Amino acid sequence: MRHAVRILLIVWILFPAMGVVLPCEAAAAPLAVFPEDAYDAGSVKEGSRVVHDFVVLNCGEEPLEILKVVPG
């Protein structure tokens, strides 16, 4: 457990140092940015439930309203 915590801490510290940052540049209007635009659930048995959360970042200065979501 301590080993895993150390690894996570090192990764958390090194990512910003390597230039890995969120793809956000400030904009005046609301701007939706999706760090992940697709998800592959792999092989799923028929009738099984698949759950996945997509992160939506608002890179604008105004509030972002999401009025409709359509699964595809």
Image: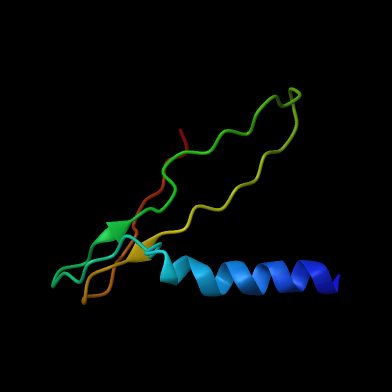
Q: In which quadrant of the rendered view does residue 61 lie?
A: bottom left
Residue farthest to the right, as pictured: 1
62 vs 68: above or below:
below
- Describe residue 38's horizontal placement relative to residue 30 as left or right: right
**Color scheme of the displayed model:** rainbow
The percent coordinates of residue 69 (x first, y second) are 41, 48
Q: Quadrant of residue 56?
A: bottom left
Q: How many marks?
A: 0
Answer with left or right where residue 72 lies relative to residue 65: right
Vertical comparison of 28 with 19: above or below? below
Identify which residue is drawn at 67% across, 39% down: 50
Residue pictured at 74% horizontal, 22% vertical: 46
Percent position of residue 38, x then y: 46, 39
Q: Residue at x 63, y 34 (%)?
A: 41
Vertical relation: 40 (above or below) 56:
above
* Quadrant (top left, top right, bottom left, bottom right) of the N terminus: bottom right
Q: Position of residue 45 (x, y in %)?
A: 76, 24
Residue reaching furthest to the left: 28
Residue drawn 15% across and 68% down?
29
In the image, residue 63 above or below residue 23: below
Relative placement, left or right, of 59 versus 4 is: left
**In the figure, is residue 39 to the left or right of 59?**
right
Viewer-nearest residue: 52 or 40: 40
Q: Nearer the viewer, residue 32 or 20?
A: 20
Residue 63 on image: x %, y %? 27, 74
